[in-house]
Image (cartoon, helix red, strand yellow):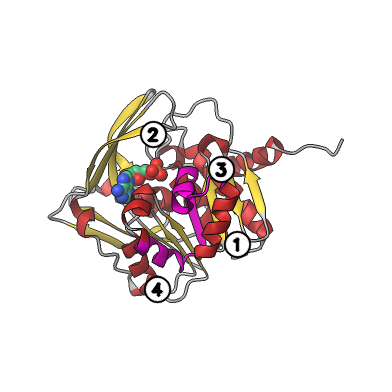
Amino acid sequence: MGLLVVGSVAFDTIETPFGRVKDALGGSAMYISVAASYFTAPVRLVAVVGGDFPPEHMKFLEDRHIDLDGLQVLREGKTFRWGGRYHYDLNMRDSLYTELNVFEKFDPIIPSGFKNSAYVCLGNIDPILQRHVLERVNKPRLVIGDTMNYWIENKPKELSETMRFMDVLVVNESEARLLTNEPSLIKAAKRIIRLGPRIVIIKKGEHGVLLVTEETVFSAPAYPLEDINDPTGAGDAFAGGFAGWLAKTDDLSVENLKRAVIYGSTLASFCVCKFSVDGMRDLTHLQIQDRYRSFMELSRFDER
Ligand code: AMP
């Protein structure tokens, strides 16, 4: 069916109480693509990097069957860089710096072979760019979009305009409240549905995920891990697993959306165990399946 992924590719410098990495592979599109690549191939990546993006990262992506025809390499420029430091409470993070570099003038050019992608996953980028992507593809079967506080606060009109063309909006709980001015997450999700997306996914970090449609509320736990080393990209890994499963199965029934939520949560749980994308470098299908089954056990109980 083809899954198109658009977003940032970055060099991340990340500090957590459990370690530090410098200029490690990151970015929203990176986490989404790598997670999705465990379910569907090829994943079609549209992003931009500079001349400093090393061949070993290209090889890693190619080995994961990620199609790089849409990865613009601006030889004269530098790759986007982001630095973040996490507190002892890993839900708290400070952004240390953001160097947009080649990302500043990113124009998401969609190669002709990517235009018929049935599934599109828009990472957290300027809603105007997200809209450009949607104008440049043939009508997809499902558009999944992410956003963040910055766009909600600074480009609310553009975001509303873009959201009208999304089928699924993935946001965290504070973003859902900010977007709707509504403290109840269920009411917030229902309001978002009135803005365009018919499926809303609200990420609640270590407390799991809510999937809300007009008729359904599905609540999934996060996998209870003993050790989390780096939460960066967990939400993107979730979106990648979710989108990858839907692209593989091409089934948008509520039951399959629930499976997609659990596959997304599965990939997010592997992602946070290691720094950068290392937790998703060489998973086996058996590992993914085992964790998926553990999720089933997590909240299964009898009638009496
Ligand atoms: P998350 O943990 O879901 O917020 O995603 C973290 C990823 O987002 C990191 O790999 C960063 O490189 C990337 N990132 C940080 N700031 C931005 C930004 N302004 N635009 C696009 N991507 C960003």
**Residue 30 placed where, x, y %?**
37, 50
Q: Which residue is mark 2?
A: 275
Q: Which mark is residue 137?
A: 4
Q: Pick whichever of labels 1 and 3 is earlier in the sequence.
A: 1
Q: Is residue 279 above or below residue 19?
A: below
Distance CA(mark 1)–CA(mark 2): 30 Å
Q: Is residue 15 above or below residue 157?
A: above
Question: Is 180 included in the stretch rendered in magenta?
Answer: yes
Q: Which residue is mark 3?
A: 266
Farthest-out residue, right: 304
Distance CA(mark 4)–CA(mark 2): 34 Å
Question: Is 142 included in the stretch rendered in magenta?
Answer: no
Q: Is residue 23 above or below residue 140?
A: above
Establish whether ligand 1 lies closer than 8 Å to the Cβ of label 1.
no
What amino acid type is highlighted by mark number 1?
A: Thr
Q: Pick whichever of labels 1 and 2 is earlier in the sequence.
A: 1
What amino acid type is highlighted by mark number 3?
A: Thr
Residue at (57, 59) in percent of width and height = 199
Q: Which residue is mark 1?
A: 249
- Circle 4 Cα neighbour tier, 10 Å, few/some/many (<14 / 14–19 / ≥20): some
Quarter of the rendering occupied by the C terminus: top right
State yes or no: discs 4 and 3 in contact (Cβ < 8 Å). no
Taking the image in four quarters, ligand 1 sits in the one at top left
Residues in magenta, as a range: 157-184
